[in-house]
Amino acid sequence: MAKERLDKLIASTGRWSRREVKTLVREGRVLVDGRIAGSAEEKYDAESCRIAVNGEELLLRRHTYVMLHKPAGVLSATEDGRGRTVLDLLTPELRKIGVFPVGRLDKDTEGLLLLTDDGELAHALLSPKKHVDKVYYARVSGRLAPEDCAAFEAGMMLGDGLECLPAGLEILAAGETSECLVTLREGKFHQVKRMLAARGKPVTYLKRLSMGSLRLDDTLAPGEFRLLTAAEEAQLPRFFVEKRKNSLQIMSKPSIMISFNQQVAQTTRVRVSGGTPCQGEFSRTSFCNSRMRSIPRSA
Ligand code: URA
């Protein structure tokens, strides 16, 4: 990782502005590898040094990931001329970093919303091809029944022509009003509401509980947010963390380089350049005018 100014590195945590970092440095409250930093302008490689503020070692990241418990009544957009958006709930420092919501929740939907400045991860979490499950808790009018679960599992075609992938429906309580968990691997417009409405059970309350391995922290009240922990970050899809490295060296066939962007074709032992050896399934590729292209499996 390239070296960056100390104030920029510390401000990237979203906890202090660059101006505040300058004050912290002046007051001798910033340590780099155990020594008091001399100036906020010093440059360091965040991957190879340890930076502590007020005695607490910082988890420095290339990207910022924020978990927000979205309340009802705010839009999951970056700007809206008329109303409040989820960005208005964050600190100015986080807004300045340029985090944006990963996908949308309806204005009246509550629950887990991830905000990040990591475009690749956002794409991965939203792509139906990556099969990242999103789990919602819903309250509906009407009695949910096993036939509703079967319809969700089969994949529904809605009256307006919307085709839905197979989805999960777990009934938690059934009566005049019912409660359920809905698991989707895609995120079409108003999808949970439309699927349940198509079964004659209109949604009266909706809350997202999880996206992939990331679960809403139940100590966060609606409107509150926090940065992801190191453990939560480590569980974000590995593929996309590793993809950030430039290239891979195939250890068994050193003459060939492969890219993570290719389709699965064969299992090959690879080494991430500058990283640790790993095992994965990747297609064979060749260089062509310094760009990569796939070689058919039979080649
Ligand atoms: N499905 C919906 O209907 N609304 C949401 O906000 C999210 C999923």
Image: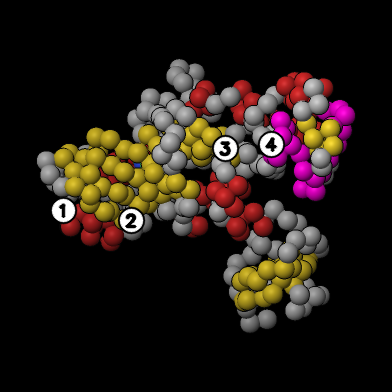
Label placed on residue 5: none
Q: Nearer the viewer, residue 2 or 294?
A: 2
Specify the amino acid type for callout 3.
Leu
Q: Disc 2 to disc 4, how far (Cα)?
A: 44 Å
Q: Earlier in the sequence, mark 3 or mark 2?
A: 2
Residue 98 at what x, y percent from top left? 63, 31
Q: Which marked residue is nearer to the observer: mark 3 or mark 2?
A: 3
Looking at the image, can residue 159 be seen? no
Q: Is residue 119 magenta?
A: no
Q: Tell me which label, 3 or 1, sits earlier in the chain.
A: 1
Identify the residue at horizontal 35%, vertical 52% (top origin): 183
- Rendered view: 32 above or below 284: above
The answer to whether residue 38 is magenta is yes
Instruction: List x then y, in percent, for residue 64.
Output: 63, 39
Viewer-proximal residue, 48 or 204?
Answer: 48
Residue at the location (73% across, 21% down)?
20
| Earlier sequence position, callout 1 versus callout 2 | 1
In 3D space, how far apart are the residues under numbered discs 1 and 2 (Cα atoms)?
15 Å
Image disc number at residue 167: 2
Label 3, on which residue?
227
Q: Quadrant of the C terminus?
A: bottom right
- The residue to which callout 4 is attached is 56
Q: What are the residue bounds of the magenta stretch? A: 37-58
